[in-house]
Structure formats: C-alpha cells, structure tokens
Image: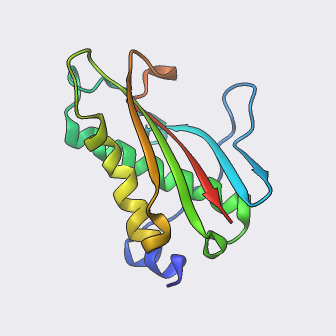
Amino acid sequence: MNVYDKLKELNITLPPVATPAAAYVPFVRTGNLVFLSGHIAKKDGKSWVGQLGKTMQTEEGKQAARAIAIDLMGTLQAAVGDLNNVKRIVKVMSLVNSAPDFTEHHLVTNGASELLGQVFGDKGAHARSAFGVAQIPTGACVEIELIAEV
C-alpha cells in the first residue's frame, strides 16, 4: 500500500513542519525511532481553543485530534523523507484539555488513531495513552505526540 495514494484518496494534503513555539525541535530521530514533539490542534491556522466537556463536545474534539494527526504526518514526512519508509506507528500520547468531569478522552483521541490506521493500515496500529489535563499551551483543546519506527 502506498501511503500517498491513501492520503490522496482521503483528500489530505500534508502541511509543512510548524515552527516550534518554544525551546524544542519538532522531531528527533535516534536509531530506527522518530519522536515527534507534541502538536496542538489548529483550526484555520490558529490554535483550536476549547475545553472538552465545557465549551466543546466529544465529536468536535475528535475532529481536532484528526487535524493533529494530519499535522503529525507532515512532520513525520519531514523527519523520514518518505512516509512509505515508516515501518510502524509505535505510540501516540494524547493530552485533552478537559473539564474535571469529562471522561471521553479515549474517544477524542480516536480521531487521530483512526486516521493513522486508515493511512498506514496495519502499520498504523499503535500503543496509546490519553489523558485529561487542566490546560494546554495557548488554550488548545488537544495536544498529541507520536513515536514511529522507520
């Protein structure tokens, strides 16, 4: 399966790597692993601000997580040159800006996980953590980081 054919079928164009907003780099490659820094949700080029269970519902959070997955794939492409060289998406960690009583972090994170599965097939199946947090930089609703094997 060619990853780029799947992206085209899904009408997805990968963005360029975003400039880090603080003292870090967008990715680090060591051996056969690539670690991608956390990417925040963006909508119309700006932080996708909101708090799940307070100003946003699960479905909108899921769409934000999907948008992050697209940004992550853009960064991963910059890190490895060709997404077809990805052997496996190893791990996804998701931070969900949520109200204290919100408990659907896992469903929000499915927005990213499901898209990675669609694009990479079996190579997209990954280990995962999803956490609720009190706040994310710039008030973004979701932040996700990723580890891939190449």
Q: Nearer the viewer, residue 141 or 147?
A: 147
* Rendered view: 68 above or below 41: below
Q: How far from the left and from the top, in percent, is residue 144?
A: 49, 40
* Rendered view: 103 above or below 79: above
* Rendered view: 120 above or below 76: below
Q: Nearer the viewer, residue 84 or 13?
A: 84
Q: Residue at x 43, y 39 (%)?
A: 129
Quadrant in the picture for residue 90:
bottom right
Q: How far from the left and from the top, in percent, is residue 72?
A: 55, 51
Q: How far from the left and from the top, in percent, is residue 28?
A: 75, 46
Q: Is residue 16 left or right of residue 120?
A: right
On the question of residue 43 being in view, the answer is no
Q: Which image quadrant: the C terminus?
A: bottom right
Quadrant in the picture for residue 141:
top left
For the image shown, how many numbered marks are present on the structure? Answer: 0
Q: Nearer the viewer, residue 6 or 96?
A: 96
Q: Is residue 146 left or right of residue 25?
A: left
Q: Residue furthest front?
A: 127
Q: Is residue 103 left or right of residue 21?
A: left
Q: Residue furthest right?
A: 31
Tell me which colouring the rendered structure shows: rainbow
On the question of residue 110 being in view, the answer is yes
Q: Nearer the viewer, residue 148 or 19?
A: 148
Q: Is residue 20 left or right of residue 62?
A: right
Q: How far from the left and from the top, in percent, is residue 20?
A: 69, 34
Q: Residue at x 36, y 42 (%)?
A: 64
